[in-house]
Image: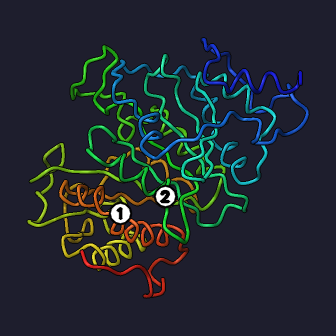
Amino acid sequence: MKRLLPLLMAMLPSAACGAPPHVAATSTSQASKTALEQVPIRSLSVAQADAEIWRPELRPAFRAPTEAQAVALEQLVPRLLDGARTGALAPDVPDLTAATGMQLERWDVLGHAHLVLHERPEDRHGMGAYLFAITPAPLPAPWMLWEAPHAYHDVDTGTIAAAMYFTPPPGPAPAAFFTNTLHRYTQIDGKRSKRSTNPADACHDAAHPLNRATLAVARTHPGATVVQLHGFGAGAAPEDGDEPRLPEGTTMVVSAGVKEAPTALSTAAATRIRALLGPGVRLYPTEAGALGATTNVEMRGLRDIPGARFLHLETAAELRSALVIDAARRDRFGALLFALAHAASPESLPELLPQGTP
């Protein structure tokens, strides 16, 4: 019991938190791994899980993590991915959890279990939320990390991404789901406004915890395919205005974040998603010259990690609304997208993949 007490105190949602010390990569506080069953568990619906992740009723100021917190997060996230696959947590997980200032729980959502690292409601400041599907199987290669890094701002992207993660169609599924927990334009003074620098923007501030966690797990677990879901409004153009507007009728821009040419993954994704969702799906940069994620900090970091891949999906408001409402259409999209992300050669996927009318 004495050996389990530090684990339970670090992970219980009601445990006190303060300014944690730096924790080294290896801890000797426990001699052996601990079973996932020791992590507190809650049963939630998808709607309840969404509310826990994003807490729309709260509007705190953004506060950047200390370097010690950020380093602990970088060390912790790969361990949680391992634990979700093996059923056992590394002995230093309790100390690392405490060092981040966050809480670790298990969630049962519709009969499926997840490890969830997220902020305490009383200390919410933009650290992000990190969910790992508990699956007793080795991590595949390639494997998929699913992200909604601009929830709040890109309306419905969080809802769609969470629904696809929590209720995946049969077939390959994401190993993890990462998302932001504050609006991208939340400032350190608590105001929500776009400025020259926006530290809460997970895709444009390299120091953001979500970016650091993503790159950390991609470095330690080869073969990561990071797929981000985003949204744009009518007549959208790039924020800096130096690229053309989108072609009329665009419903999605599929990009690898590279200005020079699409990748095999982005090309296959655009072709196959267009066949499923309709002719408004465009490939960047050959069919659309805007919203290509060329300044995305995760894309830039992943370029330096051998074997890592990046896919960026910008979706129109009308398509997002349809994916929220139409579960069958969302399932077909998820089955196709998840299969593409797990394919070593996506261009050679069998043609017998989810089909349907747009």
Disc with the residue nearer the chain's start (1 vs 2) = 2
In the image, residue 326 lies at what x, y percent? 30, 63
Q: Which of the pair 338/285 is nearer the observer?
A: 338
The amino acid on which the numbered mark 2 sits, given as a three-letter code, is Thr
Above or below, 343 against 109 in this view is below
Whether residue 214 is visible here, answered yes or no, is yes
The amino acid on which the numbered mark 1 sits, given as a three-letter code, is Ala
Relative placement, left or right, of 192 versus 37 is: left
- Describe the element under mark 2 as helix, strand or loop: loop
- Describe the element under mark 1 as helix, strand or loop: helix
In the image, residue 319 lies at what x, y percent? 22, 60
Q: Which of the pair 181/202 is nearer the observer?
A: 181
- The quadrant of the picture occupied by the N terminus is top right
In the image, residue 166 lies at what x, y percent? 50, 53
Residue of label 2: 167
Above or below, 96 against 323 in this view is above
Relative placement, left or right, of 154 versus 20 is: left
Residue of label 1: 327
